[in-house]
């Protein structure tokens, strides 16, 4: 990776579906060559960085190393505002779409990295569009199914192996502090074990820090060998997965009963969405991404549709089994 290029940094505002989405830091070589395609790094911060001023990300995570070493790459660091919890996958996808349209991006070299809450966001985003990325690095996180918003007080869900097979062709580097009391190291160790048991077609690396607690990112991102490894990875078949959902439109409907139900909606422009309410009766909406013809994925886990003789059932992983019905 050429390191001879100074960087300029600016604060940008992303818009998603005509509404303000994330602010983000845009770090780019000061003199862009219009004839050149640049690698892109997307960095997702953790829960501790939610809210406040976005400038806190200037010397945080990978940004410090990228600026000090003037790497010849573009980096975007979105910021979760106060009042929001976690990363919205659909908004991150539209942000990537915008950056790819705005800049000359090397689509074979789009990289995804994040820490803590951002590490879970990395895995969720990669599960939604695995063929979009050249490599992942996941720090102080692990299996995202274990920390889904509506299952924080429930026993951990088992890893959906069919889902993780989507990551078999992605080079992945996991890292965790073994004395972490915020997110136990077992979360990452279990993920590494599950991924390692599969017939992988790409490299799986892990770094365990015996004396570190939650913050491993200062040391990890300061390691030149990580950046050398990252920028060596390429994606031979890049695409942004615009998979048609029209053949799954029959799954749209209401599931449960007239007093307690969730809805699956479908429209040609936005695809399939899960509509439900949280414990405070707030309405929630999650974009669904197909894994197989009967298994779909969203930010809160897996949904499996079971076709019975006369009706369809929806299985929400480790939660309940809901019958499809006509809302009268």
Image (cartoon, rainbow, N blue to C red):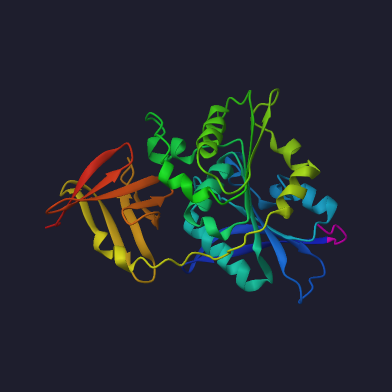
Q: Kindly identify the residue that appears in the image at 58 percent across and 45 percent down.
A: 50
Instruction: Please identify the quadrant where the C terminus is shown.
Output: bottom left
Residue 3: within the magenta? yes
Q: Kindly identify the residue that appears in the image at 60 percent across and 39 percent down.
A: 48
Q: Observer-nearest residue: 257 or 280?
A: 257
Residue 76 on image: x %, y %: 66, 58
Q: Kindly identify the residue that appears in the image at 73 percent across and 38 percent down.
A: 220
Residue 283 on image: x %, y %: 33, 51
Residues shaded magenta: 1-6
Image quadrant where residue 142 sits = top right
Q: Observer-nearest residue: 304 or 21?
A: 304
**Where 104 falls versus 264 (above or below)?**
below
Report whether 284 appears left or right of 92.
left
Q: Main secondary structure of the magenta part?
A: loop
Residue 216: within the magenta? no
Work out which residue is located at the far right of the displayed protein and give it. 4
Q: Observer-nearest residue: 105 or 86?
A: 105
Residue 146: tell me if it is visible.
Answer: yes
Work out which residue is located at the far bottom of the displayed protein and give it. 35
**Where 194 falls versus 263 (above or below)?**
above
Residue 152 on image: x %, y %: 42, 33
Q: Kindly identify the residue that appears in the image at 68 percent across and 71 percent down.
A: 103
Residue 191 on image: x %, y %: 52, 36
Image quadrant where residue 270 sits = bottom left
**Where 281 falls versus 27 (above or below)?**
above
Instruction: Please identify the quadrant where the N terminus is shown.
Output: bottom right
Image quadrant where residue 301 sits = top left
């Amino acid at each position: 990776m050429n390191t001879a290029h100074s960087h300029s940094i600016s604060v940008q505002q992303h818009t998603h579906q005509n509404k303000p989405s994330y602010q983000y830091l845009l770090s780019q070589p000061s003199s862009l060559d219009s004839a050149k395609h640049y690698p892109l790094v997307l960095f997702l911060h953790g829960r501790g960085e939610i809210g406040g001023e976005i400038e806190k990300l200037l010397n945080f995570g990978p940004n410090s190393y990228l600026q000090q070493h003037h790497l010849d790459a573009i980096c975007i660091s979105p910021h979760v505002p106060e009042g929001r919890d976690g990363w919205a996958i659909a908004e991150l996808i539209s942000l990537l779409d915008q950056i790819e349209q705005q800049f000359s991006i090397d689509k074979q070299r789009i990289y995804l990295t994040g820490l803590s809450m951002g590490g879970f966001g990395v895995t969720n985003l990669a599960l939604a569009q695995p063929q979009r990325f050249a490599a992942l690095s996941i720090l102080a996180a692990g299996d995202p199914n274990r920390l889904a918003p509506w299952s924080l007080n429930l026993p951990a869900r088992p890893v959906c192996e069919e889902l993780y097979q989507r990551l078999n062709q992605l080079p992945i580097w996991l890292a965790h502090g073994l004395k972490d009391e915020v997110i136990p190291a077992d979360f990452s160790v279990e993920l590494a074990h599950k991924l390692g048991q599969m017939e992988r077609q790409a490299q799986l690396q892990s770094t365990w820090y015996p004396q570190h607690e939650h913050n491993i990112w200062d040391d990890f991102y300061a390691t030149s060998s990580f950046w050398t490894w990252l920028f060596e990875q390429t994606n031979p078949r890049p695409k942004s997965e615009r998979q048609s959902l029209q053949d799954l439109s029959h799954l749209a409907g209401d599931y449960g009963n007239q007093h307690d139900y969730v809805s699956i909606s479908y429209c040609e422009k936005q695809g399939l969405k899960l509509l439900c309410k949280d414990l405070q009766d707030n309405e929630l909406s999650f974009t669904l991404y197909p894994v197989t013809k009967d298994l779909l994925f969203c930010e809160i886990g897996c949904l499996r549709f079971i076709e019975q003789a006369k009706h369809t059932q929806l299985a929400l992983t480790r939660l309940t089994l809901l019958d499809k019905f006509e809302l009268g």
